[in-house]
Amino acid sequence: MKTTPKDFFLHLGATVALFVSAGALLNLYFSVINYFMPDRLTGYFYASSVVWPISMLIVLVPVLYVLEWNIARDISKTPDKREVWIRKWRIYLTLFLAGALIIGDLIALINTYLNGEISARFISKIIAVLLIAAIIFAYYILVRSAGAKKTAQKILAWLGILIVIAGIVGGFMAVGSPEKQRNLRFDDQRISDLENIQWRTIAYWQQKGKLPDTLASLNDAISGFTVPTDPADHSSYQYIAKSGTQFELCATFALPSQDTSVISVPGAGPVAVPMAYSAVSGNDNWAHEAGKACFDRMIDPQAYPSFKNQSSITK
């Protein structure tokens, strides 16, 4: 039977939605496993590794199911559409890739086991890959067969939905609510602003040999620098010039600087897993609790010599 433009784009859209969704689901499960089974050698856990897959799955999985429903409806009305070339190519390509993924997964499992490096973290990822690939493979085996039972297809389709929902729930358990992520980003910006103000204060001291009286003294029309304000409510950051080269910077934070989950790792004991944004969680120099936090700074004249004092000595 001749392939119509509708047939072509339905099958093409379903293929793209399937492959991208499967990749996003695997990435999501890997990220969730990394969070709940941390490895000391892998460093930090970043919320973006969960947020992006969840976003793609929420959009693409319904699109995939709608496209598959439309394809099945067209075939029920016109059985000859089973023979269109793009449908055959799509099914066999999917079966080939899913089968290759299963084979590669089993090879990796056996190889790791024989090398004595097997772990709960690795096994969990192997199971995730095997389960997702097996469901896709089994579903399209049934789709290929004209006499396949619709009940079995529906069971596999619902099982796929349950796996996606489980992954999304696990992702939200790892990164928290959207409000929490927004607060983390605000805190990240606050730290970035304080760092900027700190370096501008040091530059001011180097150029003039004294600390600025107020933050407004740092504004520079020529360079275009304006002292930043709190990103959430645009309130001013607090600056206090103390004696000599000592000053203090204060800001109000929504969350503690390290959003950690202490997780028990077999053989390693409790491990704190820092989350999300590097400026918030990765710099002890700016560690803080939720609420108002102040940071004392003292300029080392040897590390940051004053140009004005040096010129006075020269004269």
Image: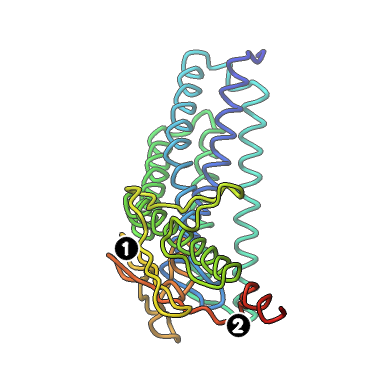
Q: What element does badge 1 sit on?
A: loop
Nearest to N terminus: mark 2 or mark 1: 2
The residue closer to the viewer here, 170 or 276, is 276
The residue closer to the viewer here, 135 or 167, is 167
View extreme (left): residue:
291
- Which quarter shows the N terminus? top right
Left or right side of 217 for 168 = left
The image shows residue 292, relative to residue 226, as above or below, that is below
Which residue corresponds to the image point at 59% horizontal and 33% vertical from the top-left?
15
Left or right side of 188 for 19 = right
The numbered mark at residue 116 is 2
Q: What element does badge 2 sit on?
A: loop
The numbered mark at residue 51 is none
User: What percent of the width, then of the height, locates residue 71?
Assistant: 51, 23
Report the residue marked by disc 1: 255
The image shows residue 213, relative to residue 313, as above or below, that is above
The image shows residue 287, relative to residue 146, as above or below, that is below
The residue closer to the viewer here, 32 or 140, is 32
**In whole angstroms, how far apart are the C-alphas of marks 2 and 1?**
42 Å
- Which quarter shows the C terminus? bottom right
Left or right side of 263 for 64 = right
Which residue corresponds to the image point at 56% horizontal and 41% vertical from the top-left?
20
The residue closer to the viewer here, 147 or 163, is 163
User: What percent of the width, then of the height, locates residue 175?
Assistant: 38, 58
Q: Quadrant of residue 268?
A: bottom left
The amino acid beneath tag 2 is Gly
Q: Quadrant of residue 110?
A: bottom right
Left or right side of 79 for 236 = left
Q: Residues within 10 Å of mark 2 (few under 14, many from 20)?
A: few
User: What percent of the width, then of the height, locates residue 157?
Assistant: 42, 39
The amino acid beneath tag 1 is Leu
